[in-house]
Image (spheres, grey):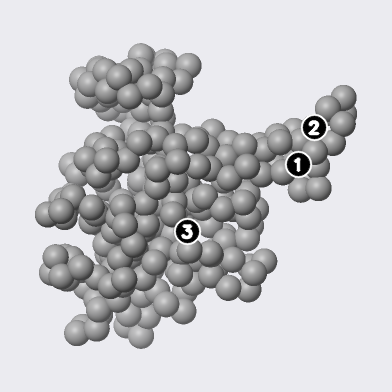
Amino acid sequence: MKIRTPLALGLAVLAISAAWTRAQETQVPEQPAPQMHLAEDRTWVGVPVHLEVTGDYLEYLLVNPHGSMHESLLSTEVGAETLNAMLLVLGLKPGKNAEWRSTIDPSQPTTAGGARNQPARETYEVIPPSGDGAYLYVAWHEGTERYFYRLEDLVRDLDRGRTMRRHQLVYLGSYVMEGRDGPAFAATMEGNLINAALMRSGSTLFTTGLEECDKQSNWLANSWLLPQRGSELCLVISTRVLDCAPAELLPLMPQARSVEEQ
C-alpha cells in the first residue's frame, strides 16, 4: 500500500523515525548523516557525495551505500528521509511518475513497465514524468581549479552521441509503504535516490524526466570530465537554474583526485 498525500506522508514519516529505524537496525544500517548545506535563500542544497561508476552502464545517478552502487554514478551517506526532509524545505511537492501506454490492440498481451521490464518500443508510448522538479549540479576542485557541471553533462547518451539532454529532474518524493514490520519509506529500504533510467516503481526521490530515459543500457558516465573514481564531490539540488557556482558554494567544494594521480 502506498501513501502519497502530504498529511499521510508527514504522519508516516514521524512514525518511521521511531518504529521503523528500530525495526531496520539489522537490515539497513544508517550512518550518521554528513553535513548538508542549505543556501541562505533556501533555493538550493549541497549534498556530499562520492563518485562511483565511471566505466559501466548507469541506471541510477545517486544511491545510498546499501543501494545499487554497482550501477550508479554517485553515492551518498545522507539517508533518504534526511535528504527528503531537506527537499521539502526547498518547497518541492511530489510529481507524477512516467507512464507506459500500449499502442497496439488491447486484446493482445503486452507488458508495461520501465527499465528491466520494458516492452518492445514499437508497442507503447512513454508519458514522461511531470510536476515539481529541480536542476542538479556537481561541484569539486582539483588544486586551484574549480569545476561546476550540470549533472546531465556528466552522463553520456549513447543513442544521441552526446550527453544527456539538460532538463529539470522531477521530484517524486518516494512513498511510505506497508512493510513487514510496519510503515516503511521505500527509498530508505531500497537505497536508491535518483534514477537515470525511468523506473515503474516510482520509489526514488527524483527521476529523470525525458521520454528517452526509458532506455536501458544507454547511459554511461562522461569520464572525460570526471575526476578519479571514489573522489568526494558536492551534489547541488537547486529550484532554479544556476549559470555559475554560487559564491556560497565555493568553500564547500571538496578536493577531488584527478585521474593523473592514479
Residue at point 63%, 60% (across, down): 218
| Residue 240 position by quadrant | bottom left
Distance Cα–Cα, label 1 vs label 3: 23 Å
Instruction: Indicate the position of residue 12 as horizontal and vertical percent values.
Output: 30, 19
Residue depicted at x 18% and y 66%:
249
| Numbered tag placed on residue 167 in the rendering | 3
- Residue at left offset 59%, top offset 66%: 157
Q: Can see residue 54?
A: no
Up-down relation of residue 258 to residue 96 (above or below): below
Residue tagged by mark 2? 110
Circle nearer the viewer, 1 or 2: 1
Residue 101 position in % (x across, y down):
71, 36
Q: To which residue does mark 1 refer?
A: 124
Q: Is residue 102 left or right of residue 237?
A: right
Is 150 placed left or right of 114 in the picture?
A: left
Neighbour class for label 1 at 10 Å: few (<14), some, many (≥20)? some
> Marks 2 and 3, Cα distance to the nearest angstrom?
30 Å
Q: Position of residue 53 (x, y in %)?
A: 46, 62
